[in-house]
Structure formats: structure tokens, C-alpha cells
Amino acid sequence: MGYALLAGLAAIVVLVSTAIFIGVGSGDSGFDDGAPQARNSAAPASSGNWVGTWSASPAAAEPHTSDGFSNMSIRNVVHTSVGGTGARIQLSNLFGNRPLTVSHATIALAAAPSNPTAAAGTMRRLTFGNKPTVTIPAGGEVTSDSVRLNVPHAADLLITTYSPTPSGPVTYHPYARQTSYVAEGDRAEDTSGTAFNKQSPYWRYLSGVDVWSAETEGAVAVLGDSITDGITSSPGANRRWTDFLAERLRTERDAPRLSVLNGGISGNRVLVDGSKFSPNNGPSALGRMNRDVLSRTGVKSVIIEMGLNDIIKPPRQRDPQKIVKGLRDLVRQAHARGLKVVGSTLTPFGGHRGYTPRMDAVRQGVNEQIRSGKVFDAYVDFDAALRDPAHPERLLAAYDSGDHLHPSDNGYRAMAQALDLKMLKGSGPAKL
């Protein structure tokens, strides 16, 4: 009788596992074949979880795109922070003023870094609610169905979308530091890449990529400005400080198994919409925290690198307490989701064209509050990591990109090294 009972239970487990495995849709762990070619020979694990491997925050409507990209294919090149056995994407029409129709979308591995050619056998057709065509309302976002694809960590992916008809302005991320591509006509399943003869420094429509992983516990999402955006990192080299952090999390012993999601927007402020002063600066951090950070897939902890633009860009906040209050409001949003928040001190900018001693006093006032331990659950001292000991108001020359505000590749690496990875562990937020 005991053996029969065990056998019956085993059969139920098999049936349930099979149902999970073959289920299709963005809300479950199933995988659609989605491939013009045969399925991958390696089936995805039946256990695991969805986690974001890459993200970019929509910043604005791209200038001179009032009718979108009708009858054109956009091939975005993005870099994974972790791998998995399946994938799905998020598309955004946040800054559009009309519905956006995508009638053909694909995902593939790039044959070479920053290259529009797809690796052999990796092209997968994407669907949305089991349909090839999706219409995204103005201000909306959509997640694709999942497809079976072995995605390596630290790999370049090609995500291609084709729009058959005019739409409103294109939602984009302007400072990608990565070359993407455009082709005439429907070239979504073009594997050679030869049709993609127009280059672009932007990411268009694409806001996120998730993978199905049995190895990654979750994601750390980073809210930041141009320093997190990596605006002075080497193009196409993936040397933002968040890229170096992802490398540490993948390779260091006893590191938490987390992906890294970049939520940086250049020129972004905590307190005000930068778009009031420059369109590409995006909504305020307070306004976009939920969408760009807290709602990302699998987020377990948050890093905030924000506040310097509130000082050096209009309207040039002179009260450090107002910036600190804004940072605390961001922390409260994360705490409401049960998430731990690691914040950073504000980095030096002496020698920058916007520098004044009065501005630096505001920066120091914010940093003093952060170091008191009463703003974030934990903090990383990027100021101490990057400053010149002989001239602490300035970046160390070896870490300076040359504009005396943004780090070089070496500076970005130093930022990632400064973070104690243990800070990203823990069961929840502290009581501040």
C-alpha cells in the first residue's frame, strides 16, 4: 500500500511538472518554441524563476520621430548580466502619443559583440498573448510570451521589432553607449545582419529582458543618473559600474546570486522632472522609482546613486535637507515593497564647469547625512572611493573621464569594487 501511494504521488508530480513546462505566457514558467528553426536541444529546467537580466529606463520621446519607424526594423543590441534557459522582453510606448503596433519581434544571440549578425540556430520569434502582433497603447508597456533560448551570462542579445504602420514619437534611451541597428522593411528574422546598414546610438522601445534561471536568486536594481548610465564609459565595451558589479556577483566566492538592472538616466534628478529643462533627462527619480526599479522582474534589493544633478543642474537645490528628504522618500517606496536599499554618497566634481564651493558644500551636507546611517539601510562611499586624497573636492586623475564629473572606465571599476557585496544580502529593510 505504501509503495502504491508513493507511485501515485510521483505520477501527480510528473503531471504537474509537465503542465508547468508546456504552459505558455508571460505570467508563468512555460516556454513557447517561437523559433523558425528547431527547438534548442537543451530543455529548460522545470524549476527556477524569472529574473531581469538587462534593463534600460525610457527617458524621452526621440526627436524627429513624430510618425515612428513605419516599415522599418529596429535591432537593439543589449548585454546580459546573467544567463538562463528562456527569455522574454518588455517593450515600452511610454512617451508615445498614439498606439504602437509591432507585427514581428524576435530575439537571438549576437554572433559577435556589438554585431547585428545572429548566432547560428538562435533566432526565436516572439509572440504576445500567443499572437505575433501587439498594439501598445500610448503610455503603455507590454511583456512578450516566453521562448526557449539558452542565454549565456555576459552575452550580447539582438532584439528586433518591426512596425508596419506609423505611430507616435519613439520611446527611447538616448545614451546607450552601445551601437544598435536599423533596416528597411521587415527584417526581424534576418540572421545575416547585412540589411541592418544604419547604426544607432540609442535603445528604442525595448525596456527590459528577463531570463528563466535556476541559478539566480533575484536582481539588484540600480536607480541612478549619468554616472549609473555610464555616459563616459567606453562605447560597446560594457564598462559601466553596474557591468563591473555584475561581473563581481557572477565570479566572486560567496557573492549573492543576483543579476544587475541598470535604471540610470543621464541628467536625472531626485526632486524634479529633468524633462522640464532638457527632454532627455527623464522624469524625477521619485516619479519613476516604481516603474523603472521596483516593478522590474525579481528585484530583491535596490541601490540608489542619485542627488548630484539636483545640485548642479537647474533649479540647483541649495538645501541639502530637501535632497535628503527626497532620498528618504525613495527609500520609503522600496521599504513598502519589503526591499533593502543601499545608497551612495555623492561623488566629487571639482574642476567641472558647473563647480562652485557653495555647490560642494551642499554635496558635503548630503554626504554627511548619508554617512550618519539614517538615510539608507546601508551605504557605499563612492565619494571616498573616487576622490583625490590631496584634493578631496576632485576626482582622482586616474578615475576622471576628463570632464571632472564622470568617472573613466577605471573609475567605474573602482565604484563596483567599493561596494561590499554583503550589503546586498539580508532579509529586509532596516528601521531608520
Image: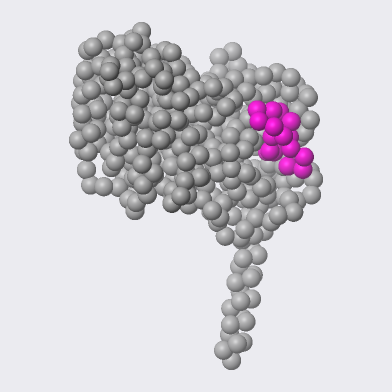
- Image point 63% across, 50% down: which residue? 85
Residue 1: percent from the left, percent from the top? 59, 91
Q: In the image shown, does 416 or 290 lie closer to the viewer?
A: 416
- Image point 63% across, 19% down: which residue? 200
As for residue 12 lying within the magenta part, the answer is no
Residue 43: percent from the left, percent from the top? 69, 56
Q: Provide the residue span drawn in magenta.
A: 106-122
**Render colour scheme:** one colour
Q: Is residue 323 left or right of residue 59?
A: left
Q: In the image shown, does 390 or 39 lie closer to the viewer?
A: 390
Residue 429: percent from the left, percent from the top? 30, 47
| Residue at the front extreme of this rendering | 390
Q: In the image shown, does 130 or 121 lie closer to the viewer?
A: 121
Residue 138: percent from the left, percent from the top? 54, 29
| Residue at the top extreme of this rendering | 353
Q: Locate the C terminus and report the quarter of the image it occupies.
A: top left
| Residue at the bottom extreme of this rendering | 1
Q: Is residue 181 visible?
A: yes
Number of numbered discs overlaid on the protein picture: 0
**Quarter-of-image position of residue 220:** top left
Q: In the image shown, does 377 or 398 lie closer to the viewer?
A: 398
**Quarter-of-image position of residue 350:** top left
- Image point 41% across, 47% down: which residue? 300
Q: Main secondary structure of the magenta part?
A: loop
Q: Is residue 172 visible?
A: no
- Image point 45% across, 30% down: which residue? 413
Q: Is residue 120 left or right of residue 200?
A: right
Q: Is residue 125 left or right of residue 269?
A: right
